[in-house]
Amino acid sequence: MRITSGQNYNDLLRNLESIRERMAQAQTEIASGNKINQLSDNPAGAADLVRLTGEKSEIDQYTSNAASAKDRLDYSDTALGTAQTMVLRVITLGQLALANPSNPGSAYTTEINGLRDQIVSVANTSFQGTSLFGGSVTNKPPYVVNPDQSVTYQGNSDATVVQTGRASTLQTQIPGDQVFSGSINVFDAVKQLSAAITGSPGPITAASTGADRSAVQANIQAQVSKLQQFYDSLSAVRSQVGSLSNAAQNTQSDLQAYELARASDQSRIQSADLAQATTDFTQNQTALQAAITAGAKISQISILNYL
Amino acid sequence: MQVLGSVLNGAMQSLLANQLGLSVASQNISNAQTPGYSRQRLNLAPSSVDGVDVIGIEALRDQLATSRYNQETSNRSSQDTLQQGLQDIQGSFNDTQGTGMLSSLTTFFNSFQALSVDPTSLTNRQAVKQAGQALSSAFQSQAANLNNQLQTANHAVATDVGSINSLTSQIAGLTKQIQLSENVNSPQNELRDQRAQLVQQLSQTVDVKQIESNGTYELTLGNGRALVFNGDAQTLSAQPDTNGMYRVKAGNFDITSDIGGGDLQGQIQLRDQMIPGYLNQMDQLAYAVTQNVNSIHSAAYTLDGNTGINFFAPMAAASGAASKISLSSDILASTRNIAASQNATAAGGNTAAIAIGNLLHNPVFSGGSVTDQYGALVFNIGSDTANAQANFKEHDALATQLQNRMQSVSGVSVDEETVKILQFQRSFQASAKVISTVDQLLQTALAMVGTVG
């Protein structure tokens, strides 16, 4: 083939251009630390990154959901613990009333009535402005005390959940009608206990007949054992809350592991192989020097030098 | 004496021929770097009478390589236009550099998950509204960006048609000149070089073929429609259709879809296929988000127990959805109108919020979830760009190869011309020597005449 100097120069320019392009590519990889700097560098990888990044943000959200759920459950547990202490005190007072029939009923009922108000307020506990025990009615207190001292539940039976995974949810609260006003209504039981201590057929005095005495005591005993049952059921609810809180904790660690897996996938697709990129860069640098040297040499060769 | 006279004549012819040879070599050396110049060669033949005959000055061209080079120039140029246009587009979908839509999408759906944790929180509601606005404006700005690219390509179509017309009229003008002044004795090599150069330039804009036989010259589009016939050029026009998209017309014929190469084809492909395809995918995505979110949202209950409220302003069809998507007036009026609850009387209900949040990964398209659909768009743009880049490289390599072949035939080698100068110089010297020798011989003969006389 006939070779002209024009061809030599064209080839030289083209080669320099393509070497510089490869060097620029390697340099971008080294500088950014990324293999994929543009979608066209690896379209399938870029689409994978979209998926992984989306999944990571989902996992972040699930983790945050689980953390909120745990906070809420732990707070519920504390509230339930307080309620338990109060119920225990009511039981103790009931038993004292049983054991000391000669004491006036008011010695116990004042405290019992006070405790009842406190249990209502515990049942109305709110966490970050939302009621814990109202089911999905979170914007008003679940229990209101009526003028006749009866208590009405204005929540519902929804056991609210949050999403903690694509297919998994976590219950974040136990509605009050499964805790305070379920099969045993604690407010009614306490009210009835109080009534039994002070109530008909009147306070037990020295003059009271045996029949009166045993009727009143049976009445008190009935309410006390009801409250004991309630105490046990509260323990059961607390252990349910505890296991939910554990689940929230475990979910968080699981999610962290998932996130780590996503991050390592991401890095596998995205992170530049620095050793490779540096080698490429150096190789191209050598090629560039060689091309320039050869180009300079070839332009010196001319027949005119020999004439 | 007759012999000596004939030798003298022959030497004279040779002197002239060698001078011409020197002038051709000098012309070649002068134009060694002139783009489009084809080297010329002095053709000589032994004379039937005395000495040497000049047959002519021939320009050396490889017609086949030239026409294939023009073809590859068209292909390369069309892929170059595509790759540059797509390069701009892919830059705005680069989520790893933070320019894409992914974070707006995930933030939006995750804000509903966050709302589900405490649906009565006005802070959470505000976050949902803001994420909705951010998503709407992300859709709108991406769509606006794509539409801008579309308009740019559209204007380029009109500009290209203008430059085609200007080139074809120049080519027709040159053809007229060539046909008027060319004859066997004086080939118009320089005018032909100029014309070839213009055709090459035209090949960058559109694919053309040229046919020259028996004195007629024809330049056609790749599909055979004539652009130049002898000295006349067919003017193309760019006329906007009802959407303002320029159609390329020859007379009344719409030849837009016949354009087979060059920048014009690249721009048409960007404008009519690539960008509308991406816009359509964006529209489908925006429409699916609107429809699915609204259908859950309007069945759920707001903080104040109202229902039937849309989150996004409802849209009748997918077409243009990405440019139009916006929050409904109810949501803009108050964040209390965000519906998270399944129950009119339970403000803390979160079933709807969870259902909307789950749209991020639940399949809402036949192809999968919202992120899958967006990932598919990203993949399409990336692979279209990568393809255009690969095609460009391929055609560029072919064009370079062909250019080398053309250069090999038509390019000037300074070394070669220098050697030729030496050759002609020596021939000239030798012919001069012949003349002086004949002169001496004649003098000798004349002296002999004197002595005898």
Image (cartoon, rainbow, N blue to C red):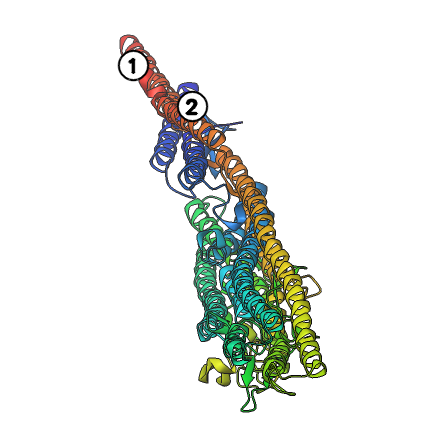
- Distance, label 1 to label 2, CA atoms, is 16 Å
Res. B443 mark: 1
Element under disc 1? helix
Q: Of residues B361 and B229, which is closer to you in this image?
A: B361
Callout 2 amino acid:
Ser
Classify B6 as above or below B276: above
- Tell which circle, 1 or 2, labels the residue nearer the N-terminal end: 2
Q: Residue at image x 38%, y 28%?
A: B414
Given residues B8 and A47, the one toward you in this image is A47
Q: Residues within 10 Å of mark 1 (few under 14, many from 20)?
A: few
Are the residues tagged 1 and 2 within 8 Å (C-beta)? no
Q: Is residue B209 visible?
A: no
In which quadrant will I find the C terminus of chain A? top left
Q: Residue furthest front?
A: A207
Q: What x and y, as percent, mark residue B182?
A: 47, 50
* Quadrant holding the N terminus of chain A: top right
Q: Which residue is mark 2?
A: B6
Q: Is residue B164 visible?
A: yes
Residue A298 lies left or right of residue B149; in this view the side is: left
Q: Chain of mark 2?
A: B
Q: Is residue A79 above or below residue A195?
A: above
Q: Amino acid at mark 1?
A: Gln
Residue B122, image x and y in percent?
A: 45, 76
In the rendered image, which quarter is residue A199 located in? bottom right
Is residue A177 found left or right of B24 in the rendered image? right
Looking at the rendering, which quadrant does residue A31 occupy?
top left
- Residue B3 got which mark? none
Comparing B443 with B384, the one in front is B384
Where does residue B375 sit, x and y in percent of width and height? Answer: 59, 57
Q: Is residue B24 above or below residue B345?
A: above
**Residue neighbourhood size for the residue with mark 2, other residues' Cα within 10 Å, grouped as few (<14), some (14–19), many (≥20):** some
